[in-house]
Amino acid sequence: MAKQILFPQSQPLPAIGQGTWYMGEKPAQRTEEANALRAGIDLGLTLIDTAEMYADGGAEKVVGEAISGRRDEVFLVSKVYPWNAAGQHAIAACEASLKRLKTDYLDLYLLHWRGDIPLQDTLKVMQQLIQQGKIRRWGVSNFDYADMQELWREAGGRGCATNQVLYHLASRGIEHDLLPWCQQQKIPVMAYCPLAQAGRLRRGLMNDPALNELANRKGVTVAQLLLAWVIHHDGVMAIPKAGSVAHVKENAAALEVTLSQEEIALMEKAFPAPGRKTPLDMV
């Protein structure tokens, strides 16, 4: 059975979802992007992640179009700018996201990254939004180990449902302390850019001889190999963006790719983890 991830008070979800970064930027691609998201839902990739930042709300509009008439099938995630993450600014930002998404509620609302607003103020408004029925859960994004420790000390901080961070085979810094701690606390980790889509390393990953040889031997693509590697970690899900139906089919098929310990070791030898604590990668 394909690996699943469980968020608090939710049905199990496939360990691969759908990201939307860069969607909504080109009107000519909007229909194709919405079709890709719908195809993903058909294939079981029912978690869709977006943000008010993406294309200045344009990605949320694409998602809203894609899930029209299918809201109950989807676990919908969006993110708030750090400068909007308290008081009336947060409520207005959430309401604007809901309007663009054409829905009454979000399944999960994330603080996109840390800013100057105190965590206690963000926690307070997240609870308000839950009480108002606008969101069902809240979480964070781009929080490193020290950020999570600070969050954990705040009243209500342990209600955090997830931490969404950059993670792929060529960016393994979270394995030093953040990932083991999240696993210990049973906090799901959402890996964005699991194929290094927005990083300078994508070409290096896709063209790596060892990865290509392994992919050929297994009869899969390098991208499927990389997704399978991300989600083999306990409590980790991947949210790759797919702008076409063909691409989303490729992503969904990665749920069925299993890696042996020998194959994992081969991949990790080609792209080893840093031997020390490193700053959290962000794009």
Image (spheres, rainbow, N blue to C red):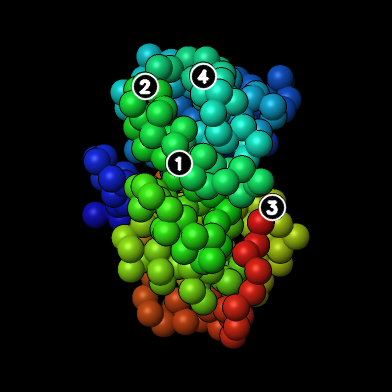
- Are the two marked residues, 2 and 3, in contact with CB atoms closer than 8 angstroms? no
**Residue type (three-letter) at the residue carrying disc 2:** Gln
Label 4 neighbour load within 10 Å: few <14, some 14-19, many 20+: some
Callout in the foreground (2, 3) = 2
Front-lying residue, 51 or 88 = 88
Residue labelled with disc 2:
132
**Residue type (three-letter) at the residue carrying disc 4:** Glu
SS at mark 3 in the image: loop
**Residue type (three-letter) at the residue carrying disc 3:** Val
Q: Quadrant of residue 169?
A: bottom right
Q: Earlier in the sequence, mark 4 or mark 1?
A: 4
Residue labelled with disc 4:
95
Q: Earlier in the sequence, mark 1 or mark 3?
A: 1
Label 2 neighbour load within 10 Å: few <14, some 14-19, many 20+: few
Front-lying residue, 66 or 143 = 143
- Are the two marked residues, 1 and 3, in contact with CB atoms closer than 8 angstroms? no
Q: CA distance from mark 4 to mark 1?
A: 17 Å
Say which residue appears at 51% left-offset and 19% top-offset. Answer: 95
Callout in the foreground (1, 3) = 1
Say which residue appears at 46% left-offset and 33% top-offset. Answer: 125
